[in-house]
Image: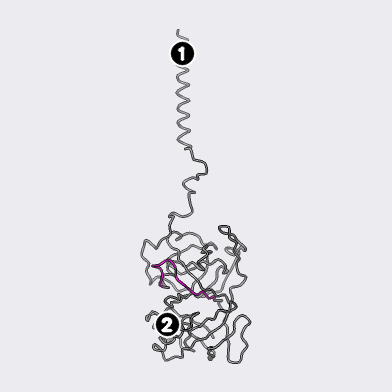
Amino acid sequence: MGKVKTLNYKIILLLIGSVLIAACSSVSSPPQTSGSAPVANAGRYSISQDRAPSTPLDPGLIRDVELLPLNRTMAGNRSPYTVNGKRYQVMATEEGFQQTGLASWYGEKFHGHLTSNGETFDMYQVSAAHTGLPIPSYARVTNLENQRSIIVRVNDRGPFHNDRIIDLSYAAAHKLGFSNQGTALVHVESIVPGQHQVLLAGASPRSDEAVSAPAVSAPVGRYLQAGAFSDLRAAQRLSGRLRELTTRPVFIRSVQAQNSQQLHRVRVGPIADATEIERITEMMVAADLGQPYMVDE
């Protein structure tokens, strides 16, 4: 009998040990359904739907983009590349590039994450994403609905929607006056730092850009470009407003790009005095006519 009792106790102890081992295993390795990922890798972004900043944007802290020499690497410039089954090509050069279409903006969902060239996206500063422009590059973006215009620095890829041509940071959309709506009709024109086209009376235009009537020849000097429009009447309206603000010459230079689209650039000048340039710029901003930029032609 003593041996039987001892044997029973051993069997009971073995059963209890097996149950404890099984319980520990289930706690340390919870079962996962097929195809699920650990919580830590559930997604790149902490929120699923993009939105405006939770912390209000302070317009006074938005810095203007400074045109600096470009230093490009392969980061963000691999070409061709494919997104959502669609193939995209990065341009060999942005010189002469122009495009008109819908712009959208991106904000808090992407804030603090890396852009295509490894920089950190800051929705409170001016930047942009484009599918084909080299990274980094600069472009002039004009909101054709209110004629506001700013310079942006392209450091990201997108938007990957057939109906949009450029994605702007929330701050850039705010400066262009459409942060309270999803999209706006814009004109995008590339800017190459240090390269300026000078076209005087009698000079031959470049093969990809020819002056057409009503083009105006002007002396060489520094000019403020107030806007660029596909609609001549819009350019004329802005010119009229500018003539009410300044006694400096205001003129429209109309050019035709490779895509045969005519573009009308509104400019003020020539202006030699830096103080006067600053004064006219401030008057334009105060009159809600956008932020002009300097050109040397």
The secondary element bearing badge 2 is classed as helix
**Is 178 inside the magenta-drawn segment?**
yes
Query: Residue 233: percent from the left, percent from the top?
Result: 46, 84
User: Does residue 94 appear in the picture of this structure?
Assistant: yes
Q: Which residue is tagged 1? A: 6
Residue 31 image offset from top left, x and y in percent: 48, 37
**Percent from the top left, x then y, of residue 41?**
49, 49
Packing grade of label 1 (10 A; few <14, some 14-19, many >=20) is: few
Identity of the residue drawn at 49% across and 40% down:
33
Seen from the viewer's position, the closer of residues 5 and 200 is 200
Query: Does any portion of residue 66 appear in the rendered image?
Result: no
| Residue 175 drawn at (x, y percent) | 42, 72
Q: Sequence-wise, which precedes: disc 1 or disc 2?
A: 1
Q: Is residue 7 above or below residue 207?
A: above
Residue at horizontal 43%, vertical 73%?
176
What's the residue type where badge 1 is placed? Thr
Looking at the image, residue 17 lies above or below residue 77? above
Residue 199 is left or right of residue 18, and the answer is right
Count residues near mark 2 (Cα–Cα under 10 Å), then give few for <14, some for 14-19, many for 20+. Answer: many
Q: Looking at the image, which residue sits at the far top?
A: 1
- Name the residue that disc number 2 marks: 281
| Residue stretch in magenta | 177-190
Q: Nearer the viewer, residue 192 or 105?
A: 105
Q: Is residue 71 magenta?
A: no
Which quadrant would the N terminus be assigned to in this image?
A: top left
Q: How many numbered discs, if any? A: 2
